[in-house]
Image (cartoon, helix red, strand yellow):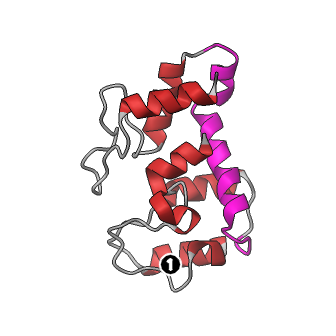
Amino acid sequence: MLALIGFAEAGKLQYDAIHVSARRRPHKRPTEMTVGEVFHWIRKTPGQQHAIGRYQFIPSTLLMLTDRANVAAQSRFNRQLQDKLGVMLLHDAGYREFLNGEITLTKFMDNLAWIWAGLPLRNGRSAYRGVAGNRATISRTFYAKQMQKIFS
């Protein structure tokens, strides 16, 4: 599932992706930065988009997740940390509830789409369509087929 989200959100750059509209990029690849350096880059480059990494964490979400996980500023923003934070968001979307049969696959997919702009809602559009240039990057049909493969 993380691979599907990374495909929709980050394209070929994956863990080193930066929002395409960011004019002032960090001096290092995201995976070479510490969490503190990521937040320093965000503070020093106001007025632009800052979605970063495989899961295109926006600043408020990154801060919330790193606080919840007690991630130190010196921690490397590497693949392992990005995946850990991504898994936290999967759980926020109702992963356990889905596995326990408490919510449907359709509901879980929509919950994920409310977290990740590249994933389409059941209407085929991003929940954040038009915000900072966001759009669904995959079709709902493709998304549903991939999710069915993952969970069958």
Report x, y in % for residue 11: 46, 58
> Which residue sits at x=47%, y=58%?
10
* Residue type pointed to by label 1: Trp
88 vs 36: above or below? above
> Which residue sits at x=62%, y=30%?
150
- Residue denoted by label 1: 41
Query: Would residue 104 be counted in the magenta stretch?
Result: no
| Residue range of the region highlighted in magenta in the rendering | 73-102
Report x, y in % for residue 77: 66, 68
> Which residue sits at x=53%, y=51%?
6
Looking at the figure, which quarter contains the C terminus? top right
Q: Is residue 73 left or right of residue 63?
A: right
Asked where in the image residue 113 lies, by quadrant, the reply is: top left
Query: Would residue 99 be counted in the magenta stretch?
Result: yes
Report x, y in % for residue 145: 48, 28
Residues 102 and 142: in front is: 142
Q: Is residue 62 left or right of residue 22?
A: right
Residues 69 and 137: in front is: 137
Q: Is residue 128 left or right of residue 96?
A: left
